[in-house]
Amino acid sequence: MEEKYESLITGIIEQGYGLVDDFLPAPFVAQIRTYLLAQKAQSKFKTAGIGQQAAQHTTIRNDQILWIEPHSPETLEARYQQALMGFLHYLNHSCYTGLRSAEMHYAFYDIGSFYKMHVDRFQHDSRRQFSAIFYLNENWADTDGGELLLQLPNGQEVKIAPKAGRFVCFRSHELPHAVLPAKRARLSITAWMLK
Ligand SMILES: O=C(O)CCC(=O)C(=O)O
Ligand SMILES: [Fe+2]
């Protein structure tokens, strides 16, 4: 994993975001995707909100989410948490980031769902330091939309397709970003590393 962690950090420092493909092996991605869909089928997802009161503003975002509990007893979730915490500890050792924990949820963007331009930090809570998104969508085509749109510090915009196994990370308070409307269901795990 170290090479992947290094490449993520270099990306964050040099261009404002890090991206690696095959963050975890494809069979794992397929399994956790199936698990997500099973949770969805059991109506465990809720329409996402905005801010700490989680008020619903479906003109800003209309995805559905399911929080993953810390230290999950579910093996698949524990494996993802292990990989993410590995990165968190690597960041602390190499960049003195002082991160303590992570919070994360599954996200399900149904056809037509989006999340308008925003930053990930709450107004009165600055604990969120890094945002990290792991995508679970096999055979995502350019025509499927649903890209993550990043507004980079240099003024450029980049569009990132939510392809299975892809992991993207950036500083939560620095980088405005949006999710463009998806033309097919778009599945992911979003995490925040907290101070
Ligand atoms: O799924 C993505 O690509 C980004 C999600 C996001 O910005 C968020 O949940 O805050
Ligand atoms: Fe976000």
Image (cartoon, rainbow, N blue to C red):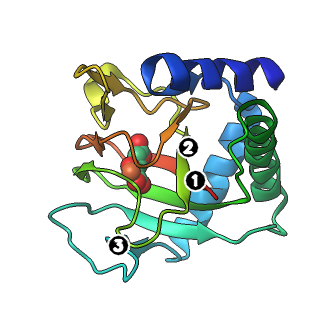
Type of residue at label 1? Ala
State the mark number for residue 132.
2
Instruction: List the single residue furthest toward the left.
Output: 59
Give the vertical position of 139 relative to 76 (above or below): above
Question: Residue 104 lies in what quarter of the image?
Answer: bottom right
Is 68 on the left or on the right of 62, as rendered?
A: right
Type of residue at label 3? Gly
Circle 1 sits on which residue?
A: 191
Give the vertical position of 112 relative to 57 (above or below): above
State the mark number for residue 51.
3
Using a 10 Å C-alpha cutoff, classify the residue at mark 3 as few (fewer than 14 neighbours), some (14 to 19) or many (20 or more).
few
Question: Residue 72 lies in what quarter of the image?
Answer: bottom right
Residue 21 visible in the displayed image: no
Could you tell which of marks 3 and 1 lies nearer the N-terminus?
A: 3
Using a 10 Å C-alpha cutoff, classify the residue at mark 2 as few (fewer than 14 neighbours), some (14 to 19) or many (20 or more).
many
Residue placed at 84% from the left, 69% from the top?
73
Q: Are marks 2 and 1 in contact (CB under 8 Å)?
A: yes
Query: Of residues 96 and 13, which is closer to you in this image?
Result: 96
Where residue 65 sits in the image (x, y, percent)?
46, 66
Is 50 on the left or on the right of 186, as rendered?
A: left
Q: Secondary structure at mark 2?
A: strand
Residue at mark 1: C-beta within 8 A of ligand 1: no
